[in-house]
């Protein structure tokens, strides 16, 4: 390892490139001063318990602070005993796969779905079946039909500000989905990490509000609302489901998953720092969303179709049917612009004419430049195609 | 959740009980001031990269600091590129199971072995086969014999200051084990979390020093030498093995496993705080080990047999053949003393007349009281038996 090759973050963007495929918070919005204050506050207490093996469900006082925070946003009281602390949503999902599936099991996902969740499912040897979505989210009829042919270990879905499509499952569909899950004893793994990031009106209530049915594991995370480097999230579910996590070998051996970072974030919650930061993020991301939407319409209006998102991180662009977005990537690299091709989000190697672009990572000048470059790539392709 | 029931750490010891079964650092030895200094140092840099999604292998500068620390202790240069950062040894082991095994696979363990690792293996549906140990550690001949009957996905072993037996695999056996692993392409998952805690002479070189063979994944951790609440450890292995971890869905989705805590510990390493703390721990734990050994001989000399450990956390007591240690537990609870019965460490429901006691968690006055109580329990049992 030479000093030139030392990598600190997950990103490895070629110099000069603006990579709209990156679905992460803007580094300049990562709250270093906030975390410094939270750390000073927490480590100023004469209490070393955050350095010990933690309670398997997560520290009780942290879960209490988190439950109060979620109660404000979910418009329904959240019981701290229904919360289990994870090391982020990905880790929570991996643990759920270990404990609730075995290789060869079928699971249902939405088509499209979060591409890296699909990789976690593949690592667990799962048979992935995609179900169609429309503008109101997962088509519950298709799920009902699917249940006549399969006995899935669970349905993985992203109900609010979906990754990559930004679609939000309608309130009516949520009721139907929950009823269906009860009728078929279908476990639903709801990835609700974008739920706290609406930019217009509030979304319908999260699936977390239905955990009393006993069919729902709702995953949340501080990665989108505070800082991904903390590796801190939660699963909200009823006791019977949570106990399977708590009693696992991993939890019994290592104790709670994030004792130290959760106690620092407890201070951020109790001091109101998380609340203020979330207000700021919603303002900034909302502006960027508006800006990127307008830039896409201006530069590419006749060429692409998309629904303007109401929250989250992403815009999902449909290109003309005959275009294979993956094949555009060499050209895009030459133009110093990046995106995620739609095929990566498909469990069936479809969606070739879609691309996902993200508005959270770059500020508006870079977004403007990037869309201009993307327009050049598509224009060249049209001329040469 | 009422205020009375709020749990912060993994421990839930009845008031008045001294539980020698707890295999954790003493809470009073958890370095709160050290971590406060490390946090102030790290968060004083104007660098928010520790809050971003981290490089999948772990932050490069942290791995560099860790490699220098390990080079001092392993007496062989450690290459930072051979290190992969985990969220603790348990998490590393869980990830290895996900990526290197499937349910129904056989794995080899030592008999006895770390009981909570056995639980992780059971969660992954693995078929666990135990191999005998003697005073020089795992019997390599038995492994060779086992390989004629099984094709294990890996051998899990604890070469140095074994949990629970405290036995250290001899230098000769290490060479034999490595040669055998090469001859049979046998993957060895070496749990070396106690290697840095010798109290007399240094142990033989770690299996980490043989990673060039390509058959070894060596797991280390800050849980025993700094603070388990950080959930920070590492796997040392050659590139081919590490790339399977790096390319997993979990790592691609969530990024590196402990970006934030690893950067704080980087400061602890660079400022020499970890080195000083380890010196202190070895002094204190060494004294406690001597004290507990002497107390056991004094109170129970004619009744139990054990080899005095040379490092680690544990003493492994052999009781008379006819005693079932698990059956002693109600009586022990009445006497306000706890221990781990040997059967928990057996993959074959054996070792019933063994118990594991730990000298790291309590100071000498409690150790003295506990051994007195244990002697009463055994004396009562002998009289009534």
Image: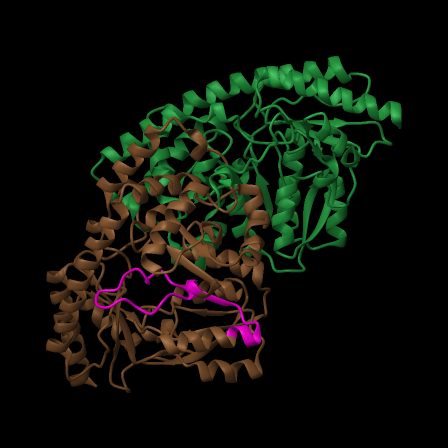
Chain colours: A green, B brown
Q: Residue A282, percent across and down?
A: 52, 20
In the rendered image of this protein, does residue B168 appear above or below residue A117?
below
In the rendered image of this protein, does residue B153 appear above or below residue B348?
above
A361 horizontally vs A249: left or right: right
Image quarter of the N terminus of chain B: top left
Quarter where residue B126 is shown: bottom right
A335 horizontally vs A256: left or right: right
Quarter where residue B271 is shown: top left
Q: What residue lies at 32% left-to-right and 62% top-to-bottom?
A: B194
Quarter where residue B20 is shown: bottom left
A119 horizontally vs A319: left or right: left
Residue A338 included in the magenta stretch of the image: no
Q: Residue B310, percent across and down?
A: 24, 70
Can residue B222 be seen? no
In the rendered image of this protein, does residue B83 appear above or below residue B165?
above
Segment colored magenta = B181-209
């Amino acid at each position: 390892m030479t000093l030139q090759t030392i990598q600190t973050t997950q990103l490895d963007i070629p110099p000069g490139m603006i990579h709209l495929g990156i679905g992460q918070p803007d580094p300049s919005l990562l709250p270093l001063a906030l975390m410094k204050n939270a750390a000073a506050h927490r480590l100023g207490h004469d209490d070393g318990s955050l350095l010990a093996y933690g309670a398997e469900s997560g520290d009780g006082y942290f879960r209490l602070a988190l439950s109060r925070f979620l109660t404000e946003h979910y418009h329904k009281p959240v019981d701290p005993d229904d919360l289990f602390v994870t090391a982020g949503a990905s880790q929570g999902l991996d643990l759920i796969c270990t404990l609730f599936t075995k290789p060869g099991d079928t699971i249902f996902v939405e088509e499209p779905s979060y591409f890296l969740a699909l990789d976690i499912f593949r690592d667990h040897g799962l048979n992935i079946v995609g179900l169609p979505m429309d503008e109101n989210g997962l088509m519950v009829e298709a799920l009902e039909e699917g249940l006549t042919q399969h006995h899935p270990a669970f349905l993985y879905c992203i109900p609010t500000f979906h990754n990559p499509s930004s679609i939000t499952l309608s309130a009516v569909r949520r009721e139907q989905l929950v009823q269906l899950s009860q009728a078929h004893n279908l476990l639903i793994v709801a990835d609700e990490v974008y739920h706290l990031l609406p930019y217009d009106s509030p979304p319908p209530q999260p699936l977390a509000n239905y955990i009393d049915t006993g069919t729902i594991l709702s995953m949340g995370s501080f990665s989108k609302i505070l800082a991904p480097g903390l590796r801190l999230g939660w699963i909200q579910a009823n006791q019977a489901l949570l106990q399977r996590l708590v009693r696992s070998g991993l939890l019994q051996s290592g104790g709670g998953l994030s004792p130290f970072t959760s106690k620092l974030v407890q201070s951020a919650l109790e001091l109101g720092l998380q609340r203020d930061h979330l207000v700021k993020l919603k303002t900034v991301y909302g502006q960027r969303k508006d800006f990127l939407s307008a830039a896409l319409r201006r530069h590419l209006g006749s060429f692409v179709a998309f629904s303007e998102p109401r929250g989250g991180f992403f815009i999902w662009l449909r290109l003309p049917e005959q275009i294979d977005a993956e094949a555009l990537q060499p050209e895009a690299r030459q133009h110093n612009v990046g995106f995620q091709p739609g095929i990566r989000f498909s469990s069936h190697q479809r969606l070739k004419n879609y691309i996902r672009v993200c508005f959270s990572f770059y500020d508006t000048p870079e977004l403007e430049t990037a869309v201009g470059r993307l327009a050049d790539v598509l224009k060249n392709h049209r001329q040469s195609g």
